[in-house]
Image: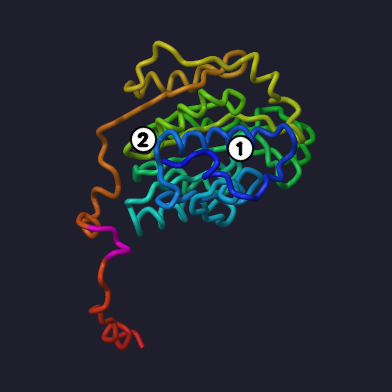
């Protein structure tokens, strides 16, 4: 089990003061420590964005991929060595925009991975354009007269697509968020934690005070009931925003469990010294 100090590298985050990325990072490191994950057996993959610099700021293995491609990179790591603890940390634009196709298909595969989405409803790194989770009517550099589309519903998307642990956290509720991530790390299957967070520089609507007045912890909810989870995700937003665990399915087989090549040992440990592909190369010469 690693301590917080052991998980903290020399690199200092370069985020704007007050950004929710700081508290998400704190919750993430505390969750990794509490879940007992070994740094040398843990990989964090990301895409491109402010918060996607997270692999630089946690002393585990890390892979900063292309924009929207954190999930494929993580999938490759997981299939090459399914014994690893694999996480993805990426923003809402990275995940629900350019990376949407990867998000949806990875959910249905139910790989044993954890996905933490830093959802600030805006593109922070590229100077404040609207993202897929920006509210209808939201004005930005890219939508000066307001967003026309309705925002995507990350919790509903994740449940419908097949994720088996689906939660929503709030960046400024650090201990609660940590507990949600601990649960995700301990879950055997695809875990999604969508984290609402303020962008202090570009999002002047969904601020910390705005969230503080609206978020509340989910209570008396059957997390095994998929329909109830989707109803809760659909019906409450605006004046009341539930945070916590929406859905938890424990018995669905993971993708890795269906791959016979890794039933006895990780793919990386297979002996390929006796593999001869010369005939194949000559065939297509």
Quadrant in the picture for residue 277: bottom left
| Quadrant position of the N terminus in the picture | top left
Disc 1 vs disc 2: which is toward the camera? Answer: 2
Q: Where is residue 6 in the image (x, y as percent from the top left)?
A: 52, 45
Q: Horizontally, is 84 left or right of 278 in the view?
A: right
Q: Mark 2 points at which residue?
A: 186
Residue pictured at 66% horizontal, 28% vertical: 136
Where's residue 224, x and y in %? Answer: 32, 22
Q: Is residue 37 above or below residue 222?
A: below
Residue pictured at 40% horizontal, 51% vertical:
41
Residue at 76 percent of width and 44 percent of height: 127
The image shows residue 111, relative to residue 169, as above or below, that is below
Rendered position, 236 above or below 127: above
Label 1, label 2: how many angstroms apart (C-alpha)? 29 Å
Query: What main secondary structure does the magenta stretch of the protein show?
Result: helix
Q: Give the range drawn in magenta.
A: 265-269
- What residue occupies the far top of the structure in this picture? 220
Q: Please check the rendered image and state whether residue 125 is part of the magenta-colored stretch, yes or no.
A: no
With 163 as the anchor, is 193 left or right in this view?
right
Q: In this view, does 87 lie above or below 137?
A: below
Q: Is residue 98 left or right of residue 272?
A: right
Q: Residue at x 35, y 45 (%)?
A: 111
Tell me the quarter of the picture where residue 196 sits.
top right
Location of residue 64 (image quadrant): bottom right
Q: Residues within 10 Å of mark 2 (few under 14, many from 20)?
A: some
Is the residue marked by circle 1 packed among few (<14), some (14-19), or many (20+) residues within 10 Å? Answer: many
Nearer the observer, 144 or 42: 42
Tag 1 residue? 132
Residue 54 locus on image (x, y percent) = 58, 46
Q: Does the magenta stretch include residue 267?
A: yes
Quadrant in which the C terminus is drawn: bottom left
Please name the colour scheme applied to the rendered image: rainbow
């Amino acid at each position: 089990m690693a301590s917080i100090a052991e998980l903290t590298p020399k690199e200092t985050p370069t985020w704007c003061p007050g950004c929710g990325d700081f508290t998400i990072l704190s919750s993430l490191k505390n969750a990794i420590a509490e879940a007992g994950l070994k740094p040398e057996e843990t990989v964090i993959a990301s895409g491109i964005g402010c918060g996607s610099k997270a692999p630089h700021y946690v002393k585990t293995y890390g892979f900063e991929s292309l924009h929207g491609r954190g999930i494929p990179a993580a999938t490759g790591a997981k299939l090459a060595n399914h014994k690893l603890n694999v996480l993805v940390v990426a923003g809402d634009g990275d995940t629900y925009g350019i990376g949407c196709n990867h998000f949806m298909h990875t959910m249905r595969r139910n790989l044993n991975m954890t996905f933490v989405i830093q959802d600030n409803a805006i593109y922070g790194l590229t100077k404040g354009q609207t993202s897929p989770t920006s509210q209808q009517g939201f004005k930005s550099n890219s939508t000066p007269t307001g967003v026309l589309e309705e925002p995507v519903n990350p919790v509903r998307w994740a449940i419908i697509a097949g994720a088996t642990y689906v939660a929503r956290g709030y960046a400024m509720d650090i201990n609660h968020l940590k507990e949600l991530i601990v649960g995700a790390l301990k879950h055997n299957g695809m875990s999604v934690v969508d984290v609402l967070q303020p962008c202090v520089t570009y999002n002047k609507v969904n601020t910390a005070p705005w969230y503080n007045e609206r978020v509340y912890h989910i209570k008396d909810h059957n997390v095994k009931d998929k329909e109830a989870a989707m109803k809760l995700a659909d019906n409450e937003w605006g004046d009341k925003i539930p945070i916590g665990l929406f859905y938890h399915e424990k018995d669905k087989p993971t993708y890795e469990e269906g791959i016979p090549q890794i039933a006895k040992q990780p793919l990386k440990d297979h002996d390929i010294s006796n593999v001869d592909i010369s005939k194949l190369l000559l065939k297509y010469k």
